[in-house]
Image (tube, helix red, strand yellow):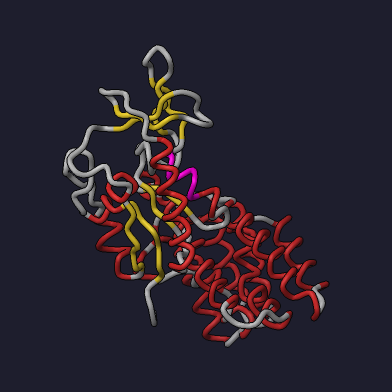
Amino acid sequence: MEQRVRVGISSCLLGNPVRYNGGHTRDRFITDTLGAYFEYVPVCPEVEAGFGTPREALRLVGDKDSPRLVTSKSGVDHTDRMLGWARQRLSGLEKEDLCGFIFMNGSPSSGMERVKVYGPKGMPVKNGVGVFARAFMEHFPLLPVEEDGRLHDPRLRENFIERVFVFKRWREVCAERPTVGRLVAFHTRHKLQLLAHSTELYREAGKLVASAKKNEAEEAYRCYRQILMAALRLKTTDKKNANVLMHILGYFKDHLTRDEKQEVLEIIEHYRQGHVPLIVPVTLLNHFVRKYDEPYLRDQYYLNPHPVELQLRNHV
């Protein structure tokens, strides 16, 4: 890669000693593996809002949709202080060209979901969102977000990283003057990725691009971005991927021998049944793309959505 992708992250996940007890929660997959491709922008809401380290632990109290952020023993309410800091920090993050954010799971400030919220009787329920995480996701509703714990799930990990790289390419397109031609070119290379996530949104995006007018390029960009990120948030499945693989196979109907076609069909079926990972049929189809120099497929990001060194498709 020419340059790493800028991704925001909860600072403690990088090994920075900013936890309430002066510790950290370094995640080596994030630092050592993803770190080769991501340039991290660390954020620690508590430290940056001036709470210091070490400090009294914080927790969410009250209603899950608008909880208060209070200290666990003394009961001091720091909600307004945190929200005031968050508004300023989010304004600054607008200039960072972020393509995603990785939150710290369970954190009352940075947890993305299932954060403990304590009710009036002192019993916690895991149905909250951290104060800063909620503000961030409301401020950047289309930005790919995930949290460290969920990144240990192979499908969630692959989906998040795929979205990050798509968002980076989208930022690069938007850095130039918006034109229908550039939108068509972007959509053309991402068609199969869209199809793997949502047939309905794939068709909707195609109709939007086909009907885009020269003098309405900016509005077309805005609408397309909404469809693109909505589609990518939907998880791929073995069935969806198998459908795309069969679609790709159709491009070689005049090239493959009967035995070659049968081999591909068998491998796709093995994948559909969960016997082999996605990397197996994709590798075989990439071989035929190179062998027969199929230009449309050669440019499809679906066949190479992220660095192969990450081995993301070895586990889905």
**Looking at the image, how many numbered discs can be counted on the residues?**
0
**Can residue 271 be seen in the rendering of this structure?**
yes
Query: Please, is residue 185 above or below residue 249 in the view?
Result: below
Of 4 and 276, the residue lying toward us: 4
Within the image, what quadrant is residue 68 found in?
top left
Residue shown at the point (54%, 79%) measured from the top left: 288
Of 262 and 109, the residue lying toward us: 109
Q: Is residue 290 magenta?
A: no
Q: Position of residue 73 (x, y in %)?
A: 26, 23
Q: Quadrant of the C terminus?
A: bottom left
Within the image, what quadrant is residue 55 found in?
top left
Q: Is residue 165 left or right of residue 75?
A: right
Query: Please, is residue 293 above or below residue 202 in the view?
Result: below
Q: Is residue 155 left or right of residue 299?
A: left
Q: Position of residue 97 (x, y in %)?
A: 47, 68
Q: Quadrant of the N terminus?
A: bottom left
Residue shown at the point (56%, 51%) measured from the top left: 235
Q: Position of residue 216 (x, y in %)?
A: 79, 74
Query: Please, is residue 9 above or below residue 263 in the view?
Result: above
Main structural element of the magenta stretch: helix, strand or loop?
Answer: helix
Residue shown at the point (62%, 85%) measured from the top left: 295
Residue lying furthest top: 121
**Can residue 237 be seen in the rendering of this structure?**
no
Q: Position of residue 291 (x, y in %)?
A: 53, 86
For the record, the magenta segment spans 130-136
